Amino acid sequence: MENKISIIVPCYKQAQYLDECLQSVLKQTYQNWECIIVNDGSPDNTEEVAQKWIETDKRFSLLNIENGGVSRARNKGIEAAKGEWILPLDADDKIGEKYLELAEKEFNKADLIYANSSFFGTVNKIWNIHYTSYQDLLINNKIYCSALYKKKDWANINGYDENLLSGFEDWEFYIRLLDDSKNVIKIIYEGFFYRRKDVSRDININKNIGLQENVKKYIFKKNIDKYLQYFPSVQTLVSEKTNIEHKYENAEKKLSTIKQELNKNIITKILYRIILIFS
């Protein structure tokens, strides 16, 4: 028996793109899916557009909720989902017609599945994003938002963090969802298309360094046990920082030396950000 896949499409002020997104769902070669459109209190005509698709195919359904951000919208949609596997899909993006078919072939050996991807919209090019290891994932996100995973695994980690309203909610979700024991499979097929626009949450957080650092500190602090597991030197550095502050009057000078050492490469930069949590 085929596995049902639940596609969750949160929509807030994206009604103009929703038809293109849902058309990519309808064109799937794999047929055992449902698509839950989550109207996240959108002030545009999201409900009207969604209703048209519900009338076209009974596999589409609509869930209206009060606006609470993409994490809450995804969680609400997944709660209502009947499928064993989940595919989040933002309302302005789209998927390749064989994405579900090829993903289903990997269900018996995978914990998370994603595919090759491209940008479209204001930027049109291949998106070279690759999952290499869990340790690398702790440093930077290596998987886009529209990967497939099991609903039971989503439930086991209490879903997406609804406090992350500005961005990076996918990264934080994957940090909790995965570890070295989990099998991440990439399909060699162009399965996901990410729309680039002049204005978006993604662009905003990547331009706003202060906001980006605050969100990362929240993520690091929340998942500090995992960071300490994979980067045990963090604990040594934290202890060294504390000892310097207690023992030396010229702590600022010595801390500056530590900062210089920590800034030598990408891993030590990320570790220093973690240390800041304890400041």
Image: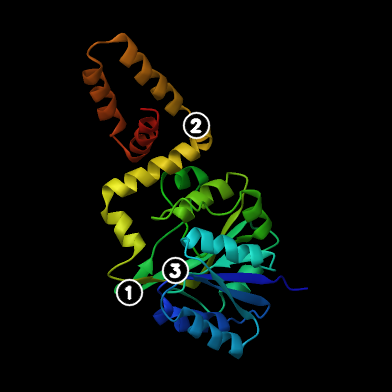
Mark 1, secondary structure of its residue: loop
**Element at label 2:** helix
Observer able to see residue 2: yes
Counting residues from the N terminus, which is met first, the one under dot 2 or under dot 3? Answer: 3
Question: What residue does disc 1 label?
Answer: 124
Amino acid carrying label 1: it is Asn
* Place of residue 163 in the rendered image (x, y in percent of width and height, measured from the top left): 47, 50
Residue 3 location, quadrant? bottom right
Residue 228: numbered disc: 2
Residue 109 against residue 249 in the figure, above or below: below
The image position of residue 193, as x and y in percent, is 43, 72
Closer to viewer: mark 1 or mark 2: 2
- Spatial separation of the CA atoms under disc 1 and disc 2: 39 Å
Mark nearer the viewer, 2 or 3: 2
Amino acid type at mark 2 = Leu
Q: Quadrant of the N terminus?
A: bottom right
In the rendered image, residue 30, in percent from the top left (x then y), is placed at 64, 79
Query: Which amino acid, by three-letter code, is at mark 3?
Result: Ser
The number of discs equals 3
